[in-house]
Image (tube, grey):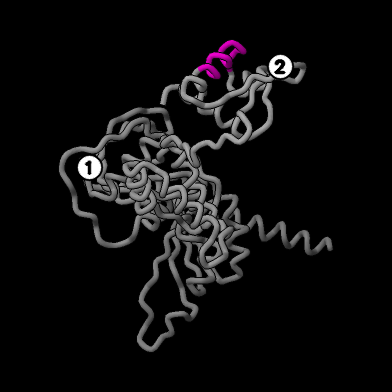
Amino acid sequence: MSRPTGRVLTLLELLQSGGTRTVAELADRLGVEGRTVRRYVDQLLDLGVPVESVRGRYGGYRLSPGYRLPPLMLSDDEALAVLLGLVAGRRAGLATAERTASETASAKIRRVLPQHLARRLDTLLEALAFTDGAGEFDAPDAGVLLTISDAVRHHRPVSIRYTDTEGRRSERTLHAYGIVAHAGRWYVTGSDPRIGEDRTFRLDRIADARTLPGSFEAPEGPGPAQRVVSGFAAAAYRHEVAVRIHGTVEQIRAHLPASVASLDEHEPAAGEDRAAERWFRVELRAERLDWLPPVLAALDRPFVIERPEELRDLVTALAERLASCARRA
């Protein structure tokens, strides 16, 4: 949709909200000059929209009383934003009734959408997965999101133009397994057929996406969300940490979730309760270590630090500070 056309529709929405709008107010909201507002009003009149000119000190423009606009006029980006907002609302616990307001609103929007856009949005929602945490997510480019979700659904390769954290640009081919919203950002996870490894990319760093001929088989095993958090836990960082902790899986995961650390869950011995406390080997990677001693202390479980030596020094220093504070009390 071109920018002038978008501004004309925005003008129509402002007038639809009711009352009289001054030329200065409309110009400010649209980011144009007053004469441009008048030109946009003429375009609405040419389309048969009855815009009235109101004279006087508080004059401006308004819609004729009793005029009823079509029930819904959304661009692709607007429809995408509304439906994703409804999904996020349900994820945030705002929907409590059996048939919630967000679900009925979603149904109403889909009924008035063009068929081709409704199909693409349904495809996006089918391809979308969430991790446990809820948050405010960065909005990726709508075209990129729809193209990749279509590739996920139909198991088609997709070519992306990507910019990494260091600003390096590259063009890659991806067999996309799914789209995941995690910790305030959107990701696509899949396999890079060139290197034969799973990769995860931030959607807001993808400048362009296009589907390619051919197809691929979706892999067995963990779903897209689990692949993303497991990939983060195994990512390359400055420090590699290995700690043995005595406790249950639930006790350890309460402080070191799967997105932070990997847990070596050995099969229990014969006759041993799976939920019983036992030794687990926990591995993680981190840029800094100063946050780990308080986490290990909060676990309140026996632990042995295998590496690095620096972590042992930090834990010892924390213990000495706590002991010193206790003695002063």
Label 1 CA crowd tier, 10 Å (few <14, some 14–19, many 20+): many
**Foreground mark, 1 or 2?**
2
Query: Which numbered disc covers residue 305?
Result: none
Dot 2 falls on a residue whose secondary structure is loop
Image quarter where the N terminus lies is top left
Q: Which region shows up in magenta? A: 32-42
Residue 291 percent coordinates (x, y): 59, 52
Residue under label 2: 55
The answer to whether 8 appears left or right of 294 in the picture is: left
For image coordinates 42% across by 22% down, the residue present is 2
Q: Going 67% across and 21% down the picture, which residue do you hit?
A: 25
- Residue at image location 39% in from the left, 55% down from the top: 225
Residue type pointed to by label 2:
Arg
Question: For residue 157, which numbered disc appears in the image?
Answer: 1
Q: Position of residue 179 (x, y in %)?
A: 37, 48
Predominant secondary structure, magenta span: helix
Which comes before the other along the chain, label 1 or label 2? 2
What crowding class fits label 2: few (fewer than 14 Cα within 10 Å), some (14-19), or many (20 or more)?
A: few
Q: Most extreme residue toward the bottom, as rendered?
A: 271
Q: Nearer the viewer, residue 270 or 15?
A: 15
Give the residue type at disc 1: Pro
SS for tag 1?
Answer: loop
Looking at this rendering, what residue extends furthest in the left direction?
A: 214
